[in-house]
Image (tube, helix red, strand yellow):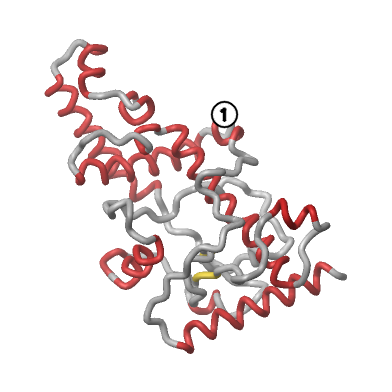
Amino acid sequence: MKVVGHSWTTRDGAERFQHSTATISKYFGIVLKAVNKIAVRLIKPPDMGVVPNPLSRTKSKNNTKYMLFTYVIAGWEGTANDARILMETIANPDNDFPMPPKGMISTFHSCKYYLVDSGFQNIPGFLAPFRGATRHFQEMRRRGGPRGRKELFNFRHSSLRNVIERCFGVLKARFPILKFMRSYSLRKQTSIVIACCALHNFIKIHAEDDKLFHEYENYEDEEGSTSGVELPLTEFNVSYAATREMTEKRDAIANQLWSDNHV
């Protein structure tokens, strides 16, 4: 924990525990491998059962599953486009990416999908906000709330996606090594990322009173948040039928939200 939680170098560990740098490096590697072996049990795919629509007003009383990582893939270059990483991850069956069952996408009140930002295409299983409609909280509040169904949809969408920003806020605050990675091999850097995500989940599940999770309960990462930014759209070769399916789904949800908001 000193290495990942305090960004200690191998030399720092050697001085603190009075062992050689070789010994510190060896045992850090052993512990890292052990954590990575149990990561598969700590980083679990989301429950794909029938659940209330996340954009509706229905909220779960069980908050345990929020702010947990459900799938982690590491090893890409930092400059790689997020949409490209997602699409290539999905396309490779070896990655075993947990896609929502098609039956869960077909109805409004019982469906499940991933929320993505404006840089992603709106395709089956992945719900993006409306482009060209305001998503910024402060602007909507100044005007007295969302204007129209698209802004209301984007507002709800952004509110839910803020959980992602808070999740990464906790992760980076707890494990500074992720912001200041040492010159380890790419393989070890990849293992460190996965281990930190696994430890994050373990703490969230077993330490309900953890101060960092409470501190970031209503946190918004100004550096990483894109709730009010129109990101460049990365388009991929996806069939018209596929994009049309999710476009119709988004329209149906937006219409229902607007209707419910005016009841």
Q: Is residue 52 visible?
A: no
Rendered location of residue 189, percent (x, y) = 25, 42
Amino acid type, mark 1: Lys
Q: Is residue 150 above or below residue 37?
A: below
Q: Residue at x 20, y 46 (%)?
A: 187
Helix, strand or loop status at disc 1: helix
Q: Is residue 207 above or below residue 115?
A: above
Bin the neighbour count of mark 1 within 10 Å (Cα to Cα): few under 14, some 14-19, many 20 and up. few
Side of 143 where 197 appears, left or right: left
Residue position marked by numbered label 1 in the rendering: 211
> Among all residues in the image, which is located at the extreme right?
263
Rendered location of residue 181, percent (x, y) = 30, 36
Rendered location of residue 98, percent (x, y) = 41, 65
Residue 179: quadrant of the picture: top left
Q: Residue at x 55, y 74 (%)?
A: 104
Q: Is residue 245 above or below residue 26?
A: below
Q: Residue at x 32, y 51 (%)?
A: 78
